[in-house]
Image (tube, grey):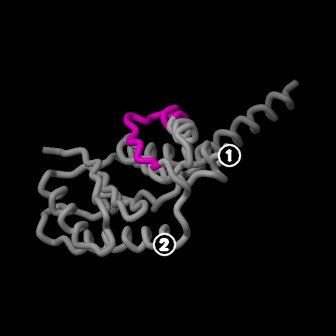
């Protein structure tokens, strides 16, 4: 009996360790990252968990994985869903899955009813995103501004900006984004601090 009890304790310990070692994707949360962020460590982890769970759930549905192209971005509990779904029914299924995820406060549905974009379009979107991030890195006129405060996502040449910002920071980020080549539209999902 004593051996079974010890075995159960060991199993429980292993499970607890395994659960605590799961870390969502993204850069390591260092003191430097926290200095450059307005979200708490817990909020950053929660956002990463939301994204990871959304992708896991969506990828587990084979019909969604094969027919749709979906991007999930979470910032401070707000979730941005972009991409393409070829029918309204598939779009609704995606939104139902995302809205059911723990710690999601608000969902912005920016899915387009269309067939998924091709590789060339997605590669161009990556170039646009990198161009915007590089431009944000050049901002030197705003005290205490770090580009990591703004999350950038591009889908079919539409740039989405998310973050906790002051109005001046948001305005400058929008102006800089407008200057980037190939940008069709800018959608802001900012939480303003002032």
The numbered mark, 2 or 1, whose residue comes first in the sequence reads: 1
Q: Residue at x 26, y 48 (%)?
A: 190
Visible residue check, residue 148: yes
* Residue 1 drawn at (x, y percent): 88, 24
**Position of 60 relative to 101 (above/below):** below
Q: Is residue 129 above or below residue 93?
A: below
| Crowding near the residue tagged with mark 1, few <14, some 14–19, many ≥20 C-alpha atoms within 10 Å | few
Residue lying at 44% horizontally and 35% vertically, measured from the top left: 103
Secondary structure under badge 1? helix
Asked if residue 17 is positioned above or below residue 134 in the image, the reply reads above
Q: Is residue 114 left or right of residue 61?
A: left
Mark 2 lies on residue: 123
Q: Position of residue 112 (x, y in %)?
A: 45, 49
Is 121 within the magenta? Answer: no
User: Which quarter shows the C terminus?
Assistant: top left
Q: Position of residue 70 (x, y in %)?
A: 52, 52
Residue drawn at x 39%, y 59% as measured from the top left: 153
Q: CA distance from mark 2 to mark 1?
A: 24 Å
Secondary element at image label 2 = helix
In the drawing, what numbered circle is on residue 34? none
In the picture, the disc for residue 63 is 1
Residue 2 figure quarter = top right
> On the rendered structure, is 59 left or right of 37?
right
Question: Could you tell me residue 123's position as x and y percent?
Answer: 48, 72
Q: Callout 2 environment at 10 Å: few (<14), some (14 to 19), or many (20+)?
A: few
Which region of the structure is painted magenta? 96-112
Q: Left of 70 or right of it: where is 133?
A: left
160 with respect to 72 (left or right): left
């Amino acid at each position: 009996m004593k051996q079974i009890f010890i075995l159960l304790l060991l199993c429980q310990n292993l499970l607890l360790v395994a659960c605590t070692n799961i870390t969502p994707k993204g850069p390591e949360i260092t003191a430097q990252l926290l200095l450059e962020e307005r979200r708490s460590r817990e909020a950053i982890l929660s956002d990463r968990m939301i994204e990871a769970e959304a992708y896991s759930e969506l990828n587990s549905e084979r019909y969604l994985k094969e027919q749709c192209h979906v991007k999930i971005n979470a910032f401070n509990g707000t979730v941005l869903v972009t991409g393409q779904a070829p029918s309204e029914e598939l779009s609704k299924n995606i939104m139902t899955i995302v809205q059911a995820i723990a710690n999601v406060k608000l969902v912005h549905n920016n899915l387009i009813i269309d067939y998924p974009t091709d590789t060339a379009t997605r590669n161009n979107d990556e170039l646009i995103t990198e161009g915007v991030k590089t431009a944000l890195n050049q901002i030197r006129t705003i005290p205490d501004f770090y580009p990591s405060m703004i999350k950038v996502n591009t889908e079919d040449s539409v740039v989405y900006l998310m973050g906790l910002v002051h109005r001046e920071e948001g305005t400058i980020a929008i102006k800089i984004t407008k200057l980037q080549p190939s940008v069709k539209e800018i959608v802001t999902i900012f939480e303003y601090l002032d």
